[in-house]
Every structure is written in C-alpha cells, then in structure tokens.
Image (cartoon, rainbow, N blue to C red):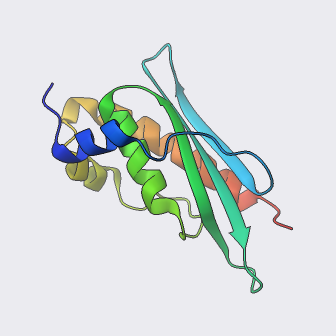
C-alpha cells in the first residue's frame, strides 16, 4: 500500500507510543488484536487552581495497520493542553483526510475514535486531588 507522507511520518517515528502510570492517569481502549485493530490511550490529567482540567501528557499502544498507528500518534501529539471532552480534537473524516486514509480503512479510524472517547470518558469521571 502507498501511504501518505503524514501517515508514514507518524508511523515511522511514533513518538507518542508507550504507556503512562501513576497519579492522574486514565486509560481507554477499544478493538481487539483478534479483529486486527486494538488501541489504548493513556492520559495524565492535571487540574489547575481554578479547577480547569487539561491533558498534561498522553501515550498510546496499538496493534494495527500503519494508518491506525499514525492516527493514534497524531492524537497524542495534539492532546497536551486540551480539556477532556467527549469528542476527538477533529472529526474522523478530517483525520482521514489529514493522514490520507483510504475509505476502506475508515473502520480503523473508528476504533481509534472509540479508544479516545473511552479515555476521555474516564478523564471526565476522574476525581483529581
């Protein structure tokens, strides 16, 4: 398969790969290795003195095609500083265009979205002390 330069760059470097542990970390996952795509996001949530919550650090683990890994890597790359919300930082179709993901791989991006939203739900429910 011919991958876009953006997909290739995120897949080759995957700077956001890894996991987080410790205080303020939430985790969300979706998919399964048996089904061909599994993604997990770990987000460290900080709360400032005014009570505003933000993602201070993000990592991912993934099993899947280069598009899956590139999308997860892009997401953790833009996560720092955003407030937890029940949405992706940009819609799936915008992410599809950004990374040049073919239509037949859209289901992979939906798995990435499900994992992201699972982590965000955990972040919204987290009691930060």
Q: Is residue 119 left or right of residue 67?
A: right
The x, y position of residue 37, in whole percent, is: 44, 25
Q: Is residue 78 left or right of residue 54?
A: left
Identity of the residue furthest to the bottom in this view: 50
Identity of the residue furthest to the left in this view: 2
Residue at 79% of width from left, 49% of height from top? 22
Identity of the residue furthest to the right in this view: 129
Judge whether 8 appears above or below 45 on screen. Answer: above
| Image label count | 0
Q: Quadrant of the N terminus?
A: top left
The x, y position of residue 21, in whole percent, is: 74, 45
The x, y position of residue 71, in whole percent, is: 37, 44
Q: Quadrant of the C terminus?
A: bottom right
Residue at 70% of width from left, 49% of height from top? 26
Judge whether 129 appears above or below 22 on screen. Answer: below
Residue at 62% of width from left, 70% of height from top? 54
The x, y position of residue 120, in whole percent, is: 61, 54
Q: Nearer the viewer, residue 96 or 10?
A: 10
């Amino acid at each position: 398969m011919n991958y876009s330069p953006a997909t290739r760059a995120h897949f080759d470097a995957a700077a956001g790969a890894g996991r987080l542990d410790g205080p303020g970390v939430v985790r969300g996952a979706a998919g399964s290795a048996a089904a061909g795509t599994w993604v997990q996001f770990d987000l460290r949530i900080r709360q400032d003195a005014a009570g505003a919550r933000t993602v201070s650090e993000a990592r991912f683990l993934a099993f899947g095609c280069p598009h899956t890994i590139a999308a997860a890597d892009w997401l953790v790359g833009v996560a720092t500083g955003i407030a937890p919300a029940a949405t992706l930082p940009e819609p799936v179709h915008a992410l599809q265009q950004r990374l040049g993901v073919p239509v037949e791989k859209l289901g992979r991006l939906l798995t990435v979205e499900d994992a992201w939203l699972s982590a965000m739900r955990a972040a919204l429910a987290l009691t930060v002390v």
